[in-house]
Image (spheres, grey):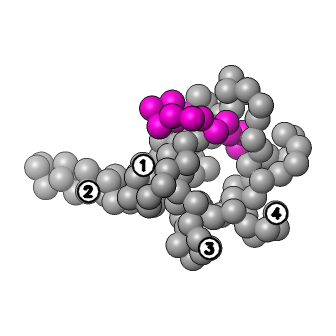
Amino acid sequence: MKKIILLTVLFLHFGLAKAQKVYSVDYENQADVKVFVVKYENQADLKVYKVKYENQAQGNDGKWFFTKYENQAKKKIFFVKYENQADLKIFFVEYENQAGWRSSSKKHLLY
C-alpha cells in the first residue's frame, strides 16, 4: 500500500510538473490550446502568474513558465483576438499567490 501511495505522489509531482511550461506559437493550427486574455479577473477560467524560473512552474495551478523553444514546452498556446475563439480564458495576476483556477471545468486542457 505504501508503494502505491509513493508511486502516486511521484507521478503527480513529476507528471504534472511539466504541465505549466508553455510556448506561445505564431499560428493557431500549431496550438494545443487557444487562449484569450480577459480584462477582468472574474471573467477568467484561470488566473495566471508568469514565473521567472522553470522549476517554479509545477502542477496545474496557474504558474506559467514561457519557454524559449517549442520543444521545451508541455503545451503550445496561441493567443486569439476574440473571446469566442478561445478554449481557455486567462487573466494575468501580479502576485504568485493569486494564481489558480476559477473554473475547474477547463482544467483538463493543460494536463
C-alpha span from label 4 to label 3: 14 Å
Kindly identify which residue carries mark 2: 10
Which is more foreground, mark 1 or mark 2?
Answer: 1
**Whole-number angstrom distance, CA of label 1 to CA of label 2:** 12 Å
Amino acid type shown at disc 2: Leu
* Contact, mark 2 vs mark 4 (Cβ under 8 Å): no
Find disc 4 in the rendering and name its residue. Answer: 28
Please report whichever mark, 3 or 2, sits nearer to the chain's N-terminal start.
2
At x 44%, y 58%, the residue is: 53
| Residue for point 55% across, 48% down | 50
Are discs 4 and 3 less than 8 Å apart at CB?
Answer: no
Tag nearer the camera, 1 or 3: 3
- Is 14 situated above or below 50? below
Give the SS element for disc 1. Answer: loop
| SS at mark 3 in the image | helix
- Say which label, 1 or 4, has the lower sequence index: 4
Q: Magenta stretch? A: 87-101
Residue type at tag 1: Gly
Q: Position of residue 98 (x, y in %)?
A: 51, 30
Q: How crowded is the residue under tag 3: few (<14 C-alpha within 10 Å), some, or many (20+)?
A: some
Residue 24 picture location, percent across and down: 69, 62
Mark closer to the chain start, 2 or 4: 2
User: Is 38 inside the magenta-drawn segment?
Assistant: no
Disc ID at residue 70: 3
Q: Secondary structure at mark 4?
A: helix
Can you see residue 29? no
Q: Residue at image x 88%, y 48%?
A: 81
Mark sitting earlier along the chain (1/2): 2
Quadrant of the rendered structure where residue 55 is? bottom left
Given this view, does label 3 or label 2 mark the residue nearer the observer? Answer: 3
